[in-house]
Image (cartoon, rainbow, N blue to C red):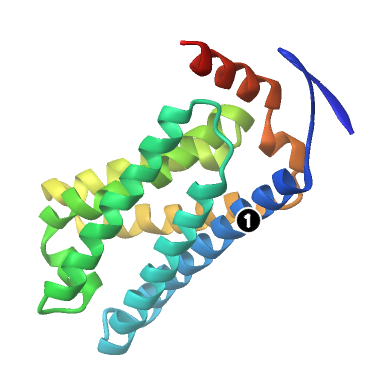
Amino acid sequence: MVYQGQFGTYTITERDRAEVITYRGGLVAAALSFALGTLLLFWQGATPIVLQILTYLYAIFTISLGISLLTIHIYLIPLHRLLQIFWGIGTIASIVIGFNANLPFALYIYQNPATILGIGFTFAALTGIYFKEGFCFHRLETQILTPIVPVLLLGHLTGVFPVQLEQILLGIWALCFLIFAARKFPQDIPSDIGDKSIFDYLKQQRASS
């Protein structure tokens, strides 16, 4: 099917559709792993088995987020690359911490807030997705998620939030993330691809400069 864009006509290929499905699948996997980890922590507490499971769930979350960042459609290539770099920095920091910490990963992060200066880049990349989705589609859950992630992380980093408030914010984050991911699948695929004529125009501008 041929679509009319701002800078001309364009078509949506099977590859475009596959990328959107992969992007949404990554979001669902990331949201489910994040929500399951939050639920286990609230339900069972920081028991040794829960802390071990949290490590695996965080790995699933990180890999899934990376897949989504690889296949997301963003007009501004520098912004897209910046989010991917943020994810890479956060992932490297997580691996370094995981191999060197003398405690389970989640417990070590919680007890050493300064580690957020490293792994926080992963969540900055996630916030970038929330912001992009909120800007494009104006959905309430993404407009909640965009500020709540940095607020919670910075609050824990500086130690200004009581534990009860951190738990409330974490619960809201997990719930809104699930809602966000679930609402992506019924959405029509072309809307996630966007106006491809803009991509072509920007590509031509870069080639001519």
Q: Going by the picture, which residue comes out furthest to the front?
A: 208
Q: Is residue 178 visible?
A: yes
Is 154 drawn above or below residue 78 in the view shown? below
Which of 61/37 is in front? 61
Tell me if 171 is positioned left or right of 9 in this view. left
Q: Residue at x 11, y 53 (%)?
A: 114
Q: Residue at x 27, y 53 (%)?
A: 90
Q: Is residue 195 visible?
A: no
Mark 1 Cα-neighbour bin, 10 Å: few <14, some 14–19, many ≥20: some
Q: Which quarter of the rendered picture does the N terminus lie within?
A: top right
Q: Residue at x 36, y 52 (%)?
A: 169
Which of 171/2 is in front? 2
Query: What is the x, y in percent for residue 14?
Result: 78, 48
Query: What is the x, y in percent for residue 140?
Result: 57, 37
Question: Which residue corresponds to mark 1?
Answer: 22
Query: What is the x, y in percent for residue 180?
Result: 58, 49
Residue 53 position by quadrant: bottom left
Residue 111 position by quadrant: bottom left
Tell me if 186 is positioned left or right of 23 in this view. right
Kind of element beneath mark 1? helix
Is 146 drawn above or below residue 75 in the view shown? below
Q: How many marks?
A: 1
Q: Going by the picture, which residue comes out furthest to the bottom?
A: 49
Tell me if 28 is positioned left or right of 18 in this view. left
Query: What is the x, y in percent for residue 174?
Result: 46, 58
Q: Given the image, on which type of amino acid does mark 1 rest?
A: Thr
Q: Residue at x 67, y 38 (%)?
A: 192
